[in-house]
Amino acid sequence: MKTRITMVVSLLAATVIGLQVHAQSSSSGDVTRSSYAPDDPSLAVATFAGGCFWCVEEGFEKIPGVVEAVSGYSGGDEVDPTYKQVSSGQTGHTEAVKVYYDPETITYQGLLQGFWRFMDPTDADGQFVDRGQQYRPAIFYHNDRQARLARESKKALAESGRYDEPVVIEIVPFEAFYPAEEYHQDYSDKNPVRYNVYTFNSGRYQFIDEVWGDDQKLDFSQFKPREGDDAMSNDAGSGAMSGTGFDPDTYTRPDDAVLRERLTEMQYEVTREDATEPAFDNEYWDEKRAGIYVDVVSGEPLFSSSDKYKSGTGWPSFVRPIREGILVRKRDESWLGVRTEIRSKYADSHLGHVFEDGAAPTGLRYCMNSAALRFIPKDQMADAGYGEFVDEVGPPRS
């Protein structure tokens, strides 16, 4: 953050009272450490790092449903560090923001979509003008569900083609958070001129404008939980859902604008426009690892590698779904005859078709599009929230 202050000083004049505030230690602004957290047990909690916590805090406080965003430090070893210690880069901490939000107004997925729009997930060594591990980006998950959603969102972002560089932001367990000194809290409101000078010259918003363009503005109403959802059991930090990687009771399919952003062109055309990908030129037709195949849109569990076989068609083929009742069959007269289309139950994604020329024991061939699937290797299933299916997964049949 010294870089930040140097920039402001050079632009406004070093004699302006208060510009040295970033070099102060906590002794000049020490307050009761718990005073920033809202006293409302119904709120959910999430923690993110995206470089300068002034900017990340301001970004989250613009999102509907966010009650409070607190600047602080996370991801290091020092207990209750000061800004001076963290800014030295020796404590292992990064500047972070703890977000308190109403899970009945905004979902964790909504927070993730907002977060991507005010940081750079391709830079693991800092953010924009601020360099060093004390500015590294990170998502600190508070429960298994947050971990799964963050990984899914990161993967979708990486596959969207939006960035020229790989998406490398770390997703790690939350361990501790230490609020920053008083003068850092709500900095954009307290010091608007200095904040605007810093942000303009940091390169953050020029980067965001270039990457996101008109997509920078997001309609957060699409991330409002449906009426009747048990929002607290899924988004609140103290009420984590940890059993499965997909919860049908809380799933809401994103609208087409979001899906166009999240999915590759082929994934969108297959799942939403009923297209068929090329044979022998798709991701999973020759996949031989043990694991589970889930809907690329929703994460619904669909097929086990134990039921996969080489059909010779050039598409991933299965003898049956991983569980009965999870697929929807529809009559399809679109291709010179009648076929049986297969769609996912909750996301209503087009997956492929089922034919009666398959392998034993069912004699069926569920011929699927790789673009409609996401494969999770067996050794990653528990961490991804699909632990209940591990015993049903083994090597493919052929």
Image (cartoon, grey):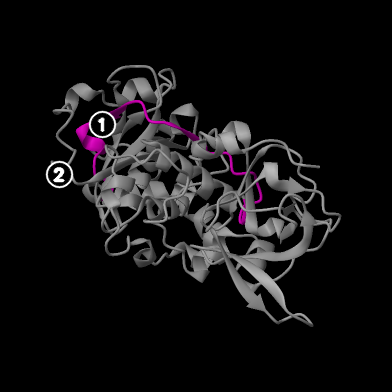
- Regarding mark 1 in the picture, which secondary structure is present there? strand
For the residue pair 192 and 6, the one nearer the viewer reads as: 192
**Does residue 154 appear left or right of residue 23 in this picture?**
right
Residue occupying image coordinates x 36% and y 63%: 220
- In the displayed structure, 232 sits above or below 240; it is below
Q: Is residue 49 visible?
A: no
User: From which residue to which does the magenta span run?
Assistant: 159-188
Crowdedness of circle 1 by 10 Å Cα count: few (<14), some, many (20+)? many
Q: Is residue 369 left or right of residue 183?
A: right
> Would residue 63 be visible to someone looking at this image?
yes
CA distance separating discs 1 and 2: 18 Å
> SS class of the residue under badge 2?
loop
Which residue matches tag 1?
179
Q: Which residue is mark 2?
A: 40
Residue 379 at x, y = what percent? 60, 31
The amino acid type, in three-letter code, at marker 2 is Asp
- The C terminus, quarter of image: top right
**Percent of width and height locating residue 36:** 18, 38
